[in-house]
Amino acid sequence: MRSRTPKLLHPLCGQPMIEWPVAAARDAGAGMIVVVDAPERPLAAVLGDRVVIAVQERPLGTADAARSASAHIDPASTVIVINGDVPLITSETLRGLAEAHARSGAAGTIATSVLEDARGYGRVVRAPDGTVERVVETKAAGDATEGELHIREVNTGIFAFDGGLLLEALAEVRDDNAQGEFYLPDVLPILRRFGRTIDAFEVADPYVTLGVNDRVGLAAVRAIAQARINERHMLAGVTIVDPASTVIDVDVEIGEDTMIAPFTSLLGATRVGARCEVGSHSTVIDSRLGDDACVVHSYLTGADVGERTSVGPFAYLRPGAVLREGSKAGTFVEIKNSEIGAGTKVPHLSYIGDTDIGERSNIGAGTITANYDGYRKNRTTIGSRVRVSVDTMFVAPVSVGDDAYTGAGSVITDDVPPGALGVARERQRNVEGYAQRRADRAAAEEAAREAAGEK
């Protein structure tokens, strides 16, 4: 990946890559999920106590990784082994593999896939009776013969084993290959030597077992995952006008009859209600939109937008912004850590920070709540049914009572009582002839400069 971030922690549609196969295993009904981690345990910090962590001290191959988990393998149970970089694996595939393994009576069952282009994959070599004889790796020259390289059936890296036989076979795996690693597929001929058979479970959808080895592969997997997420929402009653230009994270929830316009991103733990309109060019992160809300060409992060609200275009709702039912944050409005009461409108060109506004108030254009005095953040309180005129600045901490007004261009530094008009601006004074005096002064200064230059 050429990254400081471990491969399995690279994000995929809102979750670290490792979360995807772990979720599939859990949904398939796994009794215990063991994740093999590096000594620094970067995966443990993300997965927490939802899984059991086994540590592989050195990266010596997939069989060595399985050995690292030996203490957690029940000899009497079926063990399924999955690569952590196969995020599209489904619970249905894992259940199908487990059921096929139980039916076959084989010591091991390998999930395989038939690919048109099998480059880079281990090839599945069949015995004359159709069972699996071995898997031949192709990572380095010399691992496979020319004939084996023409096999199109490949190892997906997903296996089912009888736990006890797997433990016995792992003890005999050797690293006599071009890479000097212990390969998990090498347990297959060992199990055959024990007199047991190896079966194959062909996965019809090759995308399910698509692995990620670099950022190109991650992008390919993301495109498939995103298409499936979008399809799931559309089948549930959501209109996505252009799925190809729409980004929706895996945990996002969207209600019926909501319309998502092109070039919209719904990310993180976002919840969108029913009959909403979102887009276009909107980004909504970890936010809630109530039923019938409308968000146009805006950026929301950590916001709570109530029912029948209107946001945008070009609005910026920051963490802690709460818009109650029927309120509005209009064009070029920024709101942070503030509550906007039901029916209150902040139509345009305003900054509202650390403020509580009551119901059915109107905030004129160019309003600013100056919430920071250089040392601490202070709050502004504006009551219900207040009419704030254009270009009003509130210097917090300050309070405006219900039904009050402010005069245009005012800088409000003291509380305004309920029903009062707050005006705080210098009285206008017109200076007659001011423009001519400026022109005369400029001409005199220019003449003086010219005279000085002649001397």
Image: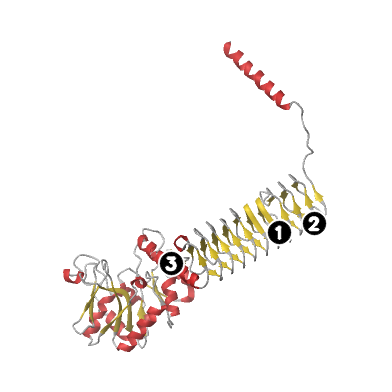
SS at badge 1: loop
Amino acid type at circle 1 is Thr
Viewer-proximal residue, 131 or 80?
Answer: 131
Q: Going from the N terminus, do you reach mark 1 or mark 3 first?
A: 3
Residue 395 x/y as whole percent:
72, 49
SS at badge 3: helix
Residue 83 x/y as whole percent:
35, 72
Q: In which quadrant will I find the C terminus?
A: top right
Residue under the image location 33 percent in, 85 percent down:
100
Please give the label number shown on residue 199.
none
In the rendered view, tell whether residue 54 sits above or below residue 283. below
| Residue closest to the far top | 455
The residue wearing badge 1 is 344
Q: Going from the N terminus, do you reach mark 1 or mark 2 first?
A: 1
Please give the label number shown on residue 403.
2
Amino acid type at circle 2 is Asp
Q: Is residue 415 visible?
A: no
Please give the label number shown on residue 227.
3
The span from disc 1 to disc 3 (Cα, nearest Å) is 38 Å
The span from disc 1 to disc 2 (Cα, nearest Å) is 13 Å
In the rendered view, tell whether residue 415 sits above or below residue 243. above
